[in-house]
Image (cartoon, rainbow, N blue to C red):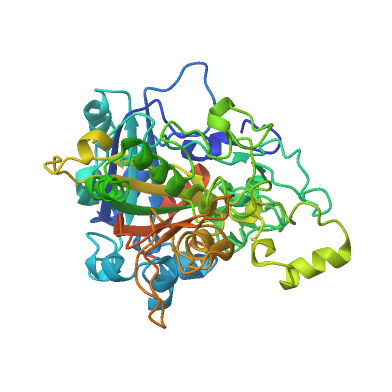
Amino acid sequence: MNKTSNFEFDDLQGLLRFGHGKLTDTCFMLLNIADVNAAKQWLSAAPITNASTTDALPDNALQIAFSVEGLRMLKLKESVIEGFSDEFIVGMTGDESRSRRLGDVGDNTPSKWEWGGSETAVPHVLLLLYARQGELDHWRTTVEGEHFATAFHLLSQLPTQSINEIEPFGFVDGISQPTIDWMQKQSTDIHERDRYSNLLAPGEMVLGYPNEYGYYTPRPLIDPQEDRLAAELPDAEDEPRLKDLGRNGTYLVIRQLSQDVPGFWQFLDKEAASDADRREQIAAAMVGRKRNGTPLIEQHIPGVAAEDHGNNFTFDLDPKGNHCPIGAHIRRANPRTGDFPPGVTGLFSRLLKILGFAQAPEEDLIASSRFHRLLRRGRSYGPVLSPKDAVKPDAPAGDRGIQFICLVANISRQFEFVQNAWMVNSKFGGVQNERGPLVGHRKPLIDGQSTDHFNRPDAAGTMRTVCHLPQFVTVRGGGYFFMPGLRALKYIAATPANGRDSAS
């Protein structure tokens, strides 16, 4: 294996390292396994793209991930499956409390989903195909080849459509992504990491490596003495006598999010009394960036770098949200916090913050960002609709949205935490009864208080409030999948289809 600082990039699926952004044509396929033997034959020869670098950009890529139901169909032993996280095993819609925490209520309730919901089973396999413009059909034919038609039943082909670097509402997307510390140069010691950093320990995204706590995330470990097929799997770094099925793999979270683009811009146009400049200002406040990607704090805080649309910044100098509202989308998605707020250095002051004894609500500690980052790999779908055209009463109809995909090593601590504690939390950062302006639902609180508004503080002391905010994004489907390393994929494909123990 080719190694770089302990990393076997040829054992990682390429999506963990690359976004395949230059491969504009995509096909996301939801499959069920129809014939186990044929599926295993296809998997054993599938041209899955790894994470090794080449001098030239590839013309195509293929990635694969499995739901827990898919792994069971492939006869992975239950004793191995038990090593995966509870969230993966139970699933995104596995219980009502999880749906409530994720904001999957009202119009988002899983019973209304088009796939993966409570009325439709979670697909066994998620197959992701990427190709250069105009070359997808040929690549798909090549990928499917022999055994595919017998092995799998196509449940659905998720819509995808390249609209360059913007998302359907019209904002530049994909700006803020964590950088994986592949060389493992950055310390995870709390005494050295009290400030925000965009560089993350590999174990935050890739199973089998130390995470930001310095620990290994639990994953399936196999005793090769009891399973001869496991001998080809990587060794577990933290349990050298065992083989690591999770190493070089990751969890893949996917959610189909439908975006009401005309509804978004028409509501803001009405709020702005058809003033185009004011409409853009309100939209930018909700997102936290202008449509070209410029962060709202860039022009107000000295020293914020403009390169890469100004991604090198924190919100430390804007604690009250006078420039970028606290409830703005980008602030909720990544508060850019360190382990402790600026100026908190002594043990006593740190303890006060941890226990919540702050002097004012805005000083309350928001959990450190480094423990809750997501590696996003989604794609948009639907025709482009500019704000200028979207505000027209006869704005063209069309289904638009994002196939949201993120890769994480810990579903609960990363995706579910961000979704629950930050994106749909009505009290995030001290805001009062307001959920995320873009992806939040508008269901009232248990006591009946409304959550359908958005506050924009002003340094002059005036609070500007947008009231009666509609829901702009609706969940249409989703699921939790495991994207294995390539040796783990070979192991899964080689597991006896009759389900008998493979011990020698």
Q: In this view, does 502 lie above or below 135?
A: below
Judged from this view, the residue extending furthest toward the top is 55
Query: In the depicted view, which residue is nearer to us: 132 or 38?
Result: 132
Using the image, determine if residue 459 lies above or below residue 85: above
Residue lying furthest bottom: 447
Going by the image, does 39 lie left or right of 292? left
Q: Is residue 37 above or below residue 384?
A: below
User: Is 385 located above or below residue 446 in the figure?
Assistant: above
Please state the total of marks drawn on the protein image.
0
Return the x and y of residue 460 as percentages of the image width and height: 58, 50
**Residue depicted at x 74% and y 72%:** 357
Which one is nearer the viewer's eye here, 475 or 133? 475
Q: Quadrant of the N terminus?
A: top right
* Position in image of residue 443 (x %, y %): 34, 71
Left or right: 216, with 18 as reference point: right
- Horizontal side, residue 412 vs residue 89: left or right: right
Name the foreground residue: 402 vs 19.
402
Residue 246 visible in this rendered orientation of the protein: yes
Foreground of the two, 272 or 108: 272
Direction from residue 9 to residue 399 in the image, left or right = left
Could you say where residue 72 lies in the image, as x and y percent from the top left? 38, 64
The quarter holding residue 67 reads bottom left
Give residue 396's quadrant in the image. top left
Task: Give the quadrant of the C terminus.
Answer: bottom right
Q: Which residue is drawn at 58% across and 62% down?
A: 429
Residue 404 location in percent, x, y?
38, 48
Residue 41 seen in render = no
Residue at the outermost left position? 394
